[in-house]
Image (tube, grey):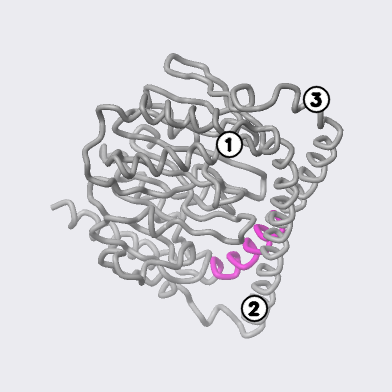
Amino acid sequence: MTENASHYFARGNTAHGAHFLYKSAFQGLDKILVLTGPPGTGKSTIIRKLAESLADRGQHVQCFHSPLRPDELDGMIATELKVGIVDQQACEWFTESGAGATIEFDFGAALNNREISAETLGRIEELKGKLTEAYSKAYESFATALRIHDEWEKFYIESMDFDKADQITQELIQELYAGHENGTPASVRHLFFGAATPKGAFDFIQSLTAQLSRRIFIKGRPGSGKSTLLKKLAASAEEKGIEVQVFHCGFDPNSLDMLIFPGLSTAIFDSTAPHEYFPDRDGDEVLDMYERTMTPGTDEAYAAEIAGIRERYSAKMKEATSHLAAAEAIDSQIKSFYTAATDFSIVEQLRIQLQSELMSHSL
């Protein structure tokens, strides 16, 4: 499926809580098939099977992964068919206007409720409370980590030459966009390329940029203007009618980490930890914001203070990750109860119905 698939996240566990980008990610579709029902009833497995089936027939699919279990899918889009499929539990937007025609498929119909005792239902409710608590603790730890990160940024912001940063931005706008303007504002699509998961940071940068001719790796320090640069480039691209995919930071969604310009076959992205990569092929280049905009010696001048901040930040991020791991374990327990009571022959019938709905759209 690799060649015919793009991989993203459209929800994240962030310093601002659960954050959803499905409304933007699924914009412009003709139809959205919404899978309802409790966890453990086969929704993610069916989404993957449908995606693989389409990809095997040469159709392009966009896969949206779960931040709790990145090997599972929360949704997919059949690109050419302009049809999306999404697990209702993964997002909260599809009932809004502009979401396209929606058709619901109830996976709860596959449950044999007689196999779920009152005692089991009580246990499930108890676990749901613990799951909410684990997520809350993770978000609280991420929020604290973000405040520590803000402390880290201050040392560099105070040492930054903002005129030079603006000059770099204007040079990039001229170089990238000249000759490609079309006078009509472009639609902008917002996505995540990575997520905070129970096993730490995870990203799809390499696969998302593999087929692009040019990749600009932004290096720097916290507060060296990487996200601001990307925000200005994105705003200018939209104004000039240049298609752009805007990738938000999975830790702080108010920040940007990458832009992809499909029509320009170009990506520019924050290539620092936890998604640090280095040029390894033709068309790769480095833009070092520290070297170009910072007072020389800033690292050395504040080395002791920054070391302490880095240590506190790392500890909080590990703490948040441990809470996500606890959430994943609790969620697995909840799923196991529903899975044990699921009639998978009915799930297979639902898969056939979904497949038929997809194929009818291609006629």
* Residue 225 disc label: 1
In this rendering, is residue 204 above or below 340? above
Question: Sequence-wise, which precedes: disc 1 or disc 3?
Answer: 1
At horizontal 59% and vertical 23% (from top left) the residue drawn is 292
- Crowdedness of circle 1 by 10 Å Cα count: few (<14), some, many (20+)? many
Three-letter amino acid code at the position of disc 1: Gly
Looking at the figure, which quarter contains the N terminus? Answer: top left
Prevailing SS of the magenta stretch? helix
Q: Secondary structure at mark 1?
A: loop
C-alpha span from label 1 to label 3: 19 Å
Tell me the mark number nearer the camera, choosing from 2 and 1.
Answer: 1
- Crowdedness of circle 2 by 10 Å Cα count: few (<14), some, many (20+)? few
Q: Which residues are magenta?
A: 325-340
- Per the image, the residue denoted by label 3 is 300
Instruction: Name the spot of residue 301 as percent of width and height, x first.
Output: 81, 28
At horizontal 43% and vertical 14% (from top left) the residue drawn is 282
Three-letter amino acid code at the position of disc 3: Glu
Instruction: Name the spot of residue 350 as percent of width and height, x first.
Output: 34, 65
C-alpha span from label 2 to label 3: 53 Å
Instruction: Name the spot of residue 347 as percent of width and height, x first.
Output: 40, 64
Q: Secondary structure at mark 3?
A: helix
At horizontal 84% and vertical 37% (from top left) the residue drawn is 305
Three-letter amino acid code at the position of disc 2: Glu
| In-front residue for pair 107/136 | 136
Residue sitting farthest toward the top = 282
- Crowdedness of circle 3 by 10 Å Cα count: few (<14), some, many (20+)? few
